[in-house]
Image (cartoon, grey):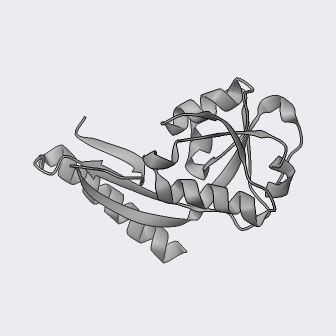
Amino acid sequence: MAVASLTIVGVGGWAAWARRAPDRPAVAALPAGRGGKGPIAAASLRDEPFILFPRQVGTSLYDQIVGACQRAGFAPRVEQEAIQMQTIVSLVAAGMGVALVPASLVNLRRTGVVYRPLTDRSPRIELGIAWRGADDGPAVQAFVGLARAHARGARERA
């Protein structure tokens, strides 16, 4: 793999470029059978089992998610941990709990999961790309250039 998109949690040994995505707040990922539509209050998740990644994998994002729950008046009951966001969403689809995930995961269209925006102040997810520092081939340069151009356009629209 020459280039990867990622949620910034640490990129040891890779060159990285990131941008904060103010239009990409976290959303609640819920099992599809939960019902309802539209935004929900984080407090409504108080009694749900949470699926989260281990804190040592992404301290900042972990703290943002736990902080959002604490602002809503509860500490999340973490019952399952997974390292990758796609795995977290799959565990939600299996009915093992709920999660707060980057809004960009809505694009995965995972069967068995519904995504609901939060009515509360939502954690903002820092998105970025990483590439091997020694790899400056044309494909990597083109991809990084497109990503940076897209980010500039997103900032201008915000």
The residue at 83%/49% (across/down) is: 46
Using the image as rendered, state which of residue 64 and residue 123 is in the foreground: 64
What residue occupies the far top of the structure in this picture? 94
Residue 48 image-quadrant placement: top right
The residue at 86%/46% (across/down) is: 37
Using the image as rendered, state which of residue 1 and residue 83 is in the foreground: 83
- Left or right side of 158 for 42: right
Q: Position of residue 31 (x, y in %)?
A: 76, 32
The residue at 71%/68% (across/down) is: 121
> Is residue 48 placed above or below 63 in the rendered structure?
above
Q: Position of residue 103 (x, y in %)?
A: 61, 51
The residue at 84%/52% (across/down) is: 38
Q: Position of residue 110 (x, y in %)?
A: 63, 30
- Left or right side of 77 for 35: right
- Left or right side of 46 for 80: left
> Is residue 64 placed above or below 9 in the rendered structure?
below
> Is residue 119 placed above or below 14 in the rendered structure?
below
Residue 110 appears in the figure: no
Residue 108 appears in the figure: yes
For the image shown, how many numbered marks are present on the structure? 0
What residue occupies the far right of the structure in this picture? 36
Quadrant the N terminus occupies: top left
Q: Position of residue 77 (x, y in %)?
A: 73, 43
Quadrant the C terminus occupies: bottom right
